[in-house]
Structure formats: structure tokens, C-alpha cells
Image (cartoon, rainbow, N blue to C red):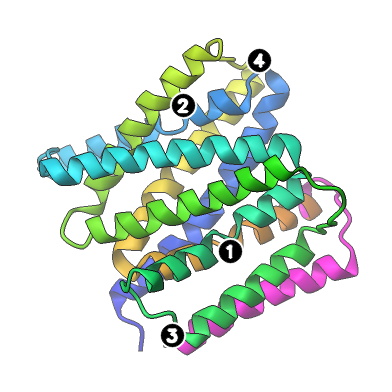
Amino acid sequence: MFSNKRYIGLFLAFSSGIGFMGSNTLAGVSYQFGTNPLTVSTTRFILPAIVLIWILKKSGLALALPKRIAIISFILGLIAVIYTMALLSAIEVLPLAIAILIFYLFPIFTGLMLAAFGWQKLSLTMTVSSLIAFLGIALALGVEFTSLNGWGIICAVTAATGLATVSIISSRLMANEDARLVTLYLSISATIILIIVCLLKGGFALPKTDAGWVSIIISHVFYAYAMIAFFISISLIGAGETTFYNNIEPILAVGVGFLFLDQNLTILQYVGVLIVLIALLYNGKKAT
């Protein structure tokens, strides 16, 4: 039977995937009104930090972490910046579907890295589910492997490796520390570094219309929830399962495109969506 802790962890894992999907979709909308990916990435970590400070203060908790944990959390912020920039670079030079597909190797990388460090056994169920889900995502995204940019592939793999690294290291830190505190330090670190990068590259590109501001603000609200939920989920059910259930994000993105953007899906894309859903249900059933 599922424990309440596991139910909460699964809910947060799924809902963080929904949040990331909503955030990225609205971020794409905001680009049409004068902003750009670097500005969105730079500002998206600010709201999670503000929300976490408010929550921790309301809970009466101190904002201090042990020096070693604080330093590692700040390093995780740096890694988050690296994988964010790598993903943006991959999207610039690769077809979007290819970039996203390669990036979604991160659940598989997370499981492999946990097993390599001896932090978690790589079960047959999780291995099979992850591979099936990856195949489903490839079909759902309608990926076509034509002439690919080598640098783009390296960037996408780097992004996937970076997120997997942040996920497994944060899971270790959160074993003895409040997940919200670790996430706060990570957010502050990423914000500081990205502001410096943004200024070096010419400054912020702010939205030029009210619609642009609305889309970017709502995007950041989604991201704040998704980021906080993602790391709390890791603290509850582990990095392997949290990243696995985030496979729901690209499937939801395909669904949004079909329902609201008049994007037609092929039979193979329908099959891909079904395959991912089966993989998620299969893993969930085996875990009970």
C-alpha cells in the first residue's frame, strides 16, 4: 500500500511536470512580445526564492544551512545555470523535438547515476519503464533524425546530465536538511549567476506589451510551484522516481498543442502518448 508520504511525493512529481509544462509554454508565448530565453531563465528563479523565504519565515524556521551544505547548494545553482544555458543552446541549433527528446534522457541518467554511486538499486521495473517512456516521448514528439548538429547534441546531453546531477545530489542533501532550504540556496545562487551572465550579454530584454508581462509573470508562477514541488518530491520519494514521473511534461505539451494550438497529431504520436501513459501506470502499479 502507498503511504501518505508517497502519495504526496507522487502528486508533487506529477504536478511539477504540469507546472514546468505550463511555465515553458507561456515562456514561449512571452518571446513573441519582446523578451528572450535568457531573460526568462534569469528571472524565473527569483519568485521561488521569494516564496521560500516567506514560507520558511512563516514557519518560524531559520534560513541558515550548515556551511558545507550551503556551499554544495550554491554549486547546484551553478550546475542549474549550466544545464539551462546548455538546453537553450541545443534548442537554438537543433530541431526542438530532437533537443527536448535528448534532454529527456535525464530520468534515465538519474537512475544510472544513482546506481553507479550505490545510492539506489536500479530496479528492472524502473529500467523497463524509463526505456518505454523514452520511446513513447520520441514518437509523441514526432522526432525525425535528419542532419543533426553535433554541438547541439553535446549541449542537449549536457543539459540532461546537469539536471540528473542536480537531482541526485539534492536528494542526498535533503536526507538531513529541509528541502525548502536547499531549494532556496540553489535558487539564490542560480539567480545571481544568471543576472551576471545576462548583463554580460547585453542586459535584460523585457516584454514590450501588457500581454508579454502577463505571460511571463504567469510563466514564473508556474515555474515557482514546479521547482519547489520538484525538490520536495525528491525529498519524499527520491530523485529516480521524481524525474521518471516528470516524463509527463512533454506528453502534456503535445496535448496542449493539439487542444489549443490546432496542431494535428499523427497516428504514431497518439501511439507515443499512449506508450508513455502505460509506462507511468506500469511503474506506479509495480511500486505499490
Q: Please name the residue shown 46% across and 70% down the image.
A: 111
Please tell me which of labels 1 and 2 falls first in the chain: 2
Mark in front: 4 vs 2: 2
Mark in front: 4 vs 3: 3
Residue that carries the numbered disc 3 in the rendered image: 287
In this rendering, the answer to whether 220 lies above or below 174 is above
Q: Is residue 187 left or right of residue 202?
A: left
Q: Please name the residue shown 30% across and 75% down the image.
A: 4
Please tell me which of labels 4 and 1 falls first in the chain: 4
Residue that carries the numbered disc 2 in the rendered image: 43
Label 4 vs label 2: CA separation? 18 Å
The quarter holding residue 51 reads top left
The quadrant the N terminus occupies is bottom left
Residue that carries the numbered disc 4 in the rendered image: 209
Whether the residues at callouts 1 and 2 have beta carbons within 8 Å, the answer is: no
Numbered badge on residue 247:
1
The amino acid sitting under disc 3 is Ala
- Image coordinates for residue 214, horizontal then vertical, percent: 58, 26
